[in-house]
Image (cartoon, grey):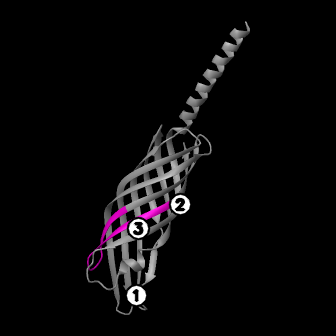
Amino acid sequence: MNKNKLSAITIIFAFASIFNISSAKAECDGFYLAGRAGYAEYEIEDDRGGVSADISNYVVDKKRFIASGALGYRHEHFRAELEYIWRDKNSGNLSSFSSAKFESQSYMFVVYYDFFPYSWFTPFVNAGIGWSDSKVRIVNPLMDTNQKVDATNFTWSLGAGISAKVTNRLNIDVGYRYFDMGDLDEFNGKTNVTDQEVYVGVRYVL
């Protein structure tokens, strides 16, 4: 009799554990909203031979604040997102009389892979494609000049990070991403703009 009771209790606990795991998976998966903030560090490859005044080095190569918002869907190991990324403007003086400003924003489709999707901590990797809108402005009031360069370029990204589960619906992410944002046709040639970003983010399953 005691053995039968023990077996019944064991079976009940086993079913309860399976039910709890299934419930946790159901809460973790589905549509979610994400927000991220951090900083970006731009870099350039300058293809303009013989140009003495390197505009990009003054303006592009600086750290700036970033913020992004995303709508995503998660199923087990995989997540897919549509993300908008805003980056603060870079500005600097090129001389006593001229100044320049650089700004960019990106629209990305990103796929993530979580190695241990239902654990308290999991590393992840991601890859994305999309496009970036980049603008350079150079103003010289003395010469009455206002030069502009606008570019909409194909953009790709790679990244990695770690995620911590606060609840079944709420996660905190810390990550790194590399972006290649294409070329700027910058007055005397082209510069290729890349971007490295470190961020902290929050995700909430709807």
Choose the circle earlier in sequence order: 3 or 1.
1
Q: Assign a secondary structure to mark 2.
A: strand
Query: Which of the numbered marks, if any, corresponds to residue 104?
Result: 3
Of all residues, the one furthest to the right in this rendering is 2
* Quarter that holds the C terminus: top right
The image shows residue 178 at horizontal and vertical percentages of 41, 60
What is the crowding at mark 1: few (fewer than 14 residues within 10 Å), some, or many (at least 20)? some
Q: Which residue is label 2 attached to? A: 37
Question: Residue 193 lies in magenta, yes or no?
Answer: yes
What residue type is disc 3 on?
Ser
Q: Assign a secondary structure to mark 3.
A: strand
* Quarter that holds the N terminus: top right
Q: What stretch is highlighted in magenta?
A: 180-198
What residue type is disc 2 on?
Ala
The residue at 38%/84% (across/down) is: 139
Q: Which residue is label 1 attached to? A: 98
Choose the circle earlier in sequence order: 2 or 3.
2
